[in-house]
Image: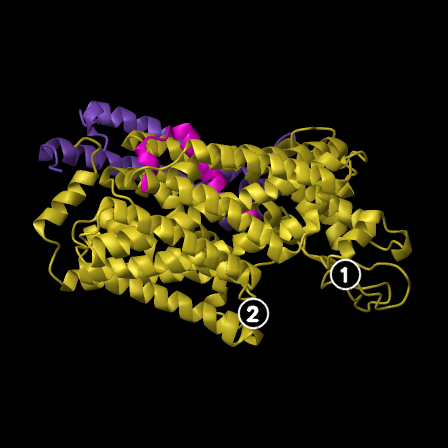
Amino acid sequence: MSIRAWTLLLVGLSFALYIAIAIRSRASSTKEFYVAGGGVPPLANGMATAADWMSAASFISMAGLISAKGYDGSVYLLGWTGGFVLLALLLAPYLRKFGQFTVPDFIGDRYYSRTARVVAVLCAIFVSFTYVSGQMRGVGIVFSRFLEVEVGTGVLIGMGIVFFYAVLGGMKGITYTQVAQYCVLIFAYLVPALYLSMMMSGNPIPQLGFGGSGETGAFLLERLDGLHEDLGFAAYTSGSKSVLDVFCITLALMVGTAGLPHVIVRFYTVPRVRDARTSVGWALIFIAILYTTAPAIAVFARTNLLNTVSEQAYSEMPEWFSRWESTGLLAHDDLNGDGKIQYVGPEAIDSDGQPIRNELHVDPDIMVLANPEIANLPAWVIGLVAAGGLAAALSTAAGLLLVISSSISHDLLKRSFLPNISPRGELLAARGAAAAGIVLAGYLGIHPPGFVGEVVAFAFGLAASSFFPAILLGIFTTRTSREGAVAGMICGLAATTLYIIWFKFLHPELNSAEHWFLGISPEGFGALGMAINFGVTVAISALTPPPPPEVQQMVLSIRVPRS
Amino acid sequence: MSPPPRSDAAAYWRANLRLLAVLLILWAAVSFGAGILFADWLNQFLLPGTGFPLGFWFAQQGAIYSFVVLVFVYAKLMNRLERKFGLEEQEDDSQ
């Protein structure tokens, strides 16, 4: 069977599975729609959270980014896992005890303020929308690459599936579908990885394989470092970013992870406080399976690529090369007219001491998507990778849509502006908002603002500089007042937004280390935004009245599991 | 929700904070410490039996394994703390 036929089959089967689960998990109350009734067992919840968390970016792009950046790619590995430790230790159990439905719920109640709630809602909606447009785009792209369907049509199909199980089942439908999606995506990720690891190091376990030696007997990493040096790239195992920048980006990603509403809300769905803690643990294990495999894939793929293309005749490239060239992810420009491919880094010089110009452009996304072809794996594996990428994108999209819809129906309508809305009315509003959200997300997926990848980094910086400090201080201090929290959130947000917009959108020509504040990139600035938020919150709280006694009691109450 | 007797809850909270401090120091040590600030220095050593430079290994693998252990250790020790102070949830507490 052809690649296309296998893809259709496997993707079709996976979609049928999600729909079947959705039908069985219809939501019939607001509690079921927002938090799956609060009855999801911790292991299943962990698995669902892992799928929710791992988006198209984790599945498709991350291994490629690590492959291109070597050690510098560690920021993603550390940042996107370390945040779960913060979640488990500092946020999840207390929010579960608090027991409402959304993050703005907590902010609004803890800071006894409708303003705070509305600020939180706007942040949640913005963060979630930027993220979800990237997912829908990812869905469209997987469809177009593997099924030869137009990107727009692919987005519409994806929208349809998500619509079905999100609008019908709410959080309940989404959670159980995500469990299935995790199984699909992890299987799809591991099969090529195990195969590659076996081929290149003799060890089927990728985590061990890439630290081992290849057929020549030399350690793979040592060889890769050597190859990098020869070709003028920075050493793979040490990278080229400044230590301060790596520190800040990692911190911003970790704290941003812990501050993302669609992740936090996952821990409202377990039965008890203690389950919230173990559920984060399970989520992290399931995430770690993929995240510890990715650097292995990165090393294997990078080694393969360099060996295959470097100084080889362009006309003798294997079939996958021209296939991926036609998608634009791979582009060769024979600048020196010698018929061979020079794939080199910025430090490359030839035997006369002249710099060699790089001729090959490699989009990082190719590493996971083209990997099975590069390794000559059977067609069904390729179809599986497509199904896995879709599972990752759809599961994250659904979680984000839930946040958007609950922000509107629960936080804006029920808790702020229409408090007398009936439960049935609220449920209807929630479904309506989910439907509208999907349509808008689909539109953004078909007509992306053009800078989707950067906007996702923006989302992390915002979460780090707005939600995380507000929630953390709300739990661990009783003195933080509403004025302090609102001021802190706004200052942190404003600083981070301005910095990112300045360098990424207004003056991209200035976007390099010598112009950055202390050499910290826009991706890392969220760490400073967070510090600004903390500083402003503490200072203003000291100057304003403390929270009313019932709020202080509430804080003491959420710190202990027993009611 | 009314909170339990102040003395129990306060002692429990202090024990909680102490545990958090220890675990967060370890969290920072494996990630920011071994994986970032000291990575270059650690890279002169290889993880025994493998070809992994040690700093690089912490950044790309070791820290992640440590995170998993930290979270489960935390969950287990908190369960013990809850029992010790008599503050675990009752069956009818879940909302």
Q: Colour of chain A?
A: yellow
Q: Measured along the vertical axis of the image, is residue A68 above or below residue A380? A: below
The picture places residue B63, in percent across and down from the top left corner, at 50, 39
Q: Which residues are magenta?
A: A34-56
Q: Main secondary structure of the magenta part?
A: helix
Q: Pointer 2 and pointer 1: residues touching (CB < 8 Å)?
A: no
Secondary element at image label 2: loop
Q: Residue at x 63, y 53 (%)?
A: A141
Q: Quadrant of the C terminus of chain A?
A: top left
Query: Alpha carbon of mark 2 to alpha carbon of mark 1: how far?
Result: 25 Å
- The residue indicated by pointer 2 is A512
Locate the N terminus of chain A and report the quarter of the image it occupies: top right
Q: Does residue B52 show up? A: no
Is A563 or B74 nearer to us in this picture? A563
A113 drawn magenta: no
Nearest the eye: A425 or A258? A425
